[in-house]
Image (tube, rainbow, N blue to C red):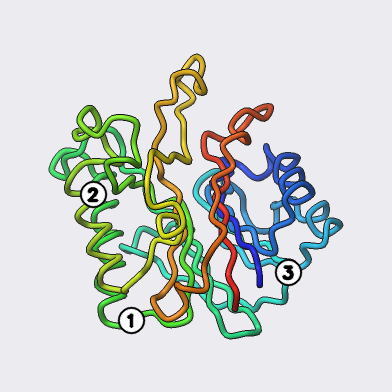
Amino acid sequence: MFTLATWNINSVRLREGLVARLLRDEAPDILCLQECKSPVDKIPLAQFRELGYGHVVARGQKGYNGVAILSRLPIEDAGDRDWARLGHARHVAARLENGVTIHNIYVPAGGDIPDRAVNEKFAQKLDFVAEMRDVFHADRPERAIMVGDFNIAPREDDVWSHKQLLKVVSHTPIEVDHLLAAQEAGGWVDITRQDIPEGQLYSWWSYRARDWDAADRGRRLDHVWASPDIAQAGHGSRVLRGVRGWDQPSDHVPVFASFDL
């Protein structure tokens, strides 16, 4: 069995101490980070290695995007893809010794206006997810886990108010349709909702809220999916809501799952 976590850290250099705290307190075997905002050679790995995370694959760029996989288990670099030809560091894959491939993906946020005709960022987001659909349809994943900040909350109970967010980027019908089409194309199973099928569940709370906890206007933007051949091995999902209350936190919190593989 191994335990995996995904977390949009919103600058790994700024929040190195929070990453170290999570590794000490929760000790996942694998931690996938998004929005590292750092070139690979500037990611502060020394403290993570001291904590036992000596295996790393990452893709980075200065100030934006960036994804990294930290592991206590041996992993090998399994490549990356430049989704929608954006030239962004938004994907990296690692392969475990048991042959399971872990994909760490950071889908574009999409800006503020949910109209591709007037908002290039929204168009890029839709194109990114549409390419995911096409790739999974052409090459159906096997023995694969895909995690990350998908920047889409697909279910009505993945947001604080389905009705009020229908025209807000991250929960618009066109985004949800695109994400569900990508999920269906690959046969991906949403492990978090397999384990926690009912009820409101969030992994992100805006910085704009004066009291994020009391307002509780969250969205589930961070996901753990598994290919259908290994989905039944997934269990133990949890969202670490309390991390949002740490000092100088990311606006996202870690999402965990374990796999008996």
Callouts 3 and 1 close, C-beta under 8 Å: no
Residue that numbered label 1 is attached to: 140
Query: What amino acid type is highlighted by mark number 3?
Result: His
Residue 97 is marked as: none
Query: What amino acid type is highlighted by mark number 2?
Result: Glu
Dot 1 alpha-carbon crowd within 10 angstroms: few under 14, some 14 to 19, many 20 or more: some
State the residue at coordinates (21%, 40%). Answer: 119
Separation of marks 3 and 2 at Cα, in angstroms = 34 Å
Q: Secondary structure at mark 3?
A: strand
Residue 55 is marked as: 3
Where is 31 relative to 213, above or below? Answer: below
Callouts 3 and 2 close, C-beta under 8 Å: no
Q: Nearer the viewer, residue 113 or 245?
A: 245
Q: In which quadrant will I find the C terminus? A: bottom right
Q: Which tag, 3 or 2, sits closer to the chain's start?
A: 3
Query: What amino acid type is highlighted by mark number 1?
Result: Arg
Residue that numbered label 2 is attached to: 175
State the residue at coordinates (34%, 36%). Answer: 159
Dot 3 alpha-carbon crowd within 10 angstroms: few under 14, some 14 to 19, many 20 or more: some
Look at discs 3 and 1 and give the one toward the viewer: 1
Q: Which tag, 3 or 1, sits closer to the chain's start?
A: 3
Q: In which quadrant will I find the N terminus? A: bottom right
Where is 248 relative to 3, above or below? Answer: above
Callouts 2 and 1 close, C-beta under 8 Å: no
